[in-house]
Image (cartoon, rainbow, N blue to C red):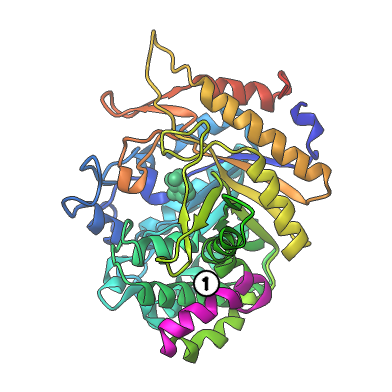
Amino acid sequence: MKREMFPSDFLWGVATASYQIEGAYNEDGKGESIWDRFAHTPGKIKDGTTGDVACDHYHRYREDIALLKELGVNSYRFSVSWPRIFPCGKGEVNQKGLDFYNALVDELLKQGIKPLLTLYHWDLPQPLQFHGGWTNTDTVQAFLEYAMLLFKTLGDRVELWATFNEPWCISFLSHELGEHAPGIKDRRTALQVAHNVLVAHGKAVKAFRGKNLPGKIGIVLNLYPVHPLSESEQDKEAATLSDCYRNRWFLDPVFKGKYPEELLSVYQKLYGDFAKDYESIQVASEKMDFLGVNYYSREVVSYDPKSILKSKTVKVEGKRTDMDWEIYPQGIQEILVRINREYGPIDLYVTENGAAFKDEMKNGKIQDYERIDFLKEHFKNTYYAIQQGVPVKGYFVWSLMDNFEWAHGYSKRFGLFYVDYNDNLKRIPKESARWFKKFLNNEISLE
Ligand SMILES: OC[C@H]1NNC[C@@H](O)[C@@H]1O
């Protein structure tokens, strides 16, 4: 199974995000983001690092685009730093911020690489957070102004637009579990955030349509197959509620304009006031052109009467990545087939798939054969989904290079290129980069 067996117009790319690679956190007029503040808060990042410099992509973007060219990808997914465009979140525009993304897009196009632009990959301008962040509908309005400016500035050259990256992380990971910025731990707040982000998504899609732009727009969701540990009714009930929490809380609003009833009723019992605005979620279901699917692993759950989701995650035997995530390649096939069956037809992109392993330099090489095996199996399972008629239109490896892995700092390496943080952030191709290049050049098969 070679690259040529995939559709001829299939996009093969890599993905990154602004806060994780750009650095220049306070340069050229950029404002503070909630991740600047979170990372500077002692105890929040496991290795005590920040994205102040990161991979210095802001200054090295031409060098990094040369790496893309060298790999042989035909597409590149990146995100725009909102506070680089609107330092206060709204109002005054930072022209140097627009200049950077104009130059980035122009260089990508010059190299024959199609951009996929994510408007929001978590770096909210901190001034908006001072006024409640995503709990405040003013932030929805500010996001629309930000999106409209980027549509106007880049809409003639960027064909693929994603509104949000992983709203589950923006809401529950960041406002219920508190592991990501702004580090709030309150479920009712998280539900309000999820609601406003989904409303902002729908309004941005509608605004995009109004601009009559040549491109396509969608959202990127991190999705997990959820499996019951046993076929008992209780474990199956646990899987249903966990599936609602992880997947359907976002899938159902953007495709069906409503929340999944099974979990909505649980929240309504807990938060009666939630009922007053949940019906307005219909706004989120403006028709999209594609869905971005970020896939990393599955979740196995068993019944837990103490949990409001009646479920707890179970760690099953099997190979795991350095993030301690189970390696489950058939899950990418499962999730793509399910989306097509239950929410399709719609074009799908695997907007992120990859793995962290303990990559080490040995004799001048990084022999990350586990990552090659991981990618090979996930490419194959993506192909099996295509064979079943699922309209998968592209696949983006997470990530081009090692970068700031959020609360893990630089301790987790997902890149195809190793970044030597002790030697001027030098980018060194791992064996997986060499393998990917050969695959893209039809030199090797996936068997
Ligand atoms: O954890 C790996 C990736 N997951 N999706 C969002 C990205 O920002 C993460 O680095």
Relative depth, front residue between 135 and 243: 243
Is 265 situated above or below 382? below
Q: Give the range drawn in magenta.
A: 252-273
Other residues around mark 1 within 10 Å, as few (<14) / some (14–19) / many (≥20): some
Give the residue displayed 71% in from the left and 19% down from the top: 444
Q: In this view, does 422 lie to the left or right of 17?
A: left
Residue 322 image offset from top left, x and y in percent: 41, 33
Query: Magenta segment: does it hold 254?
Result: yes
Picture quadrant of residue 356: top left
> Considering the numbered disc 1 on the image, is that residue within a helix, a strand or a loop?
helix
- Residue drawn where x is 27% and y is 51% of the image: 27
Q: Residue 116: percent from the left, percent from the top?
A: 59, 51
> Residue visible at 64% across and 63% down?
217
Residue 274 visible somewhere in the drawing: yes
Question: Quick check: 346 above or below 322?
Answer: below
User: In this rendering, is residue 254 above or below 218?
Assistant: below
| Residue hosting label 1 | 148
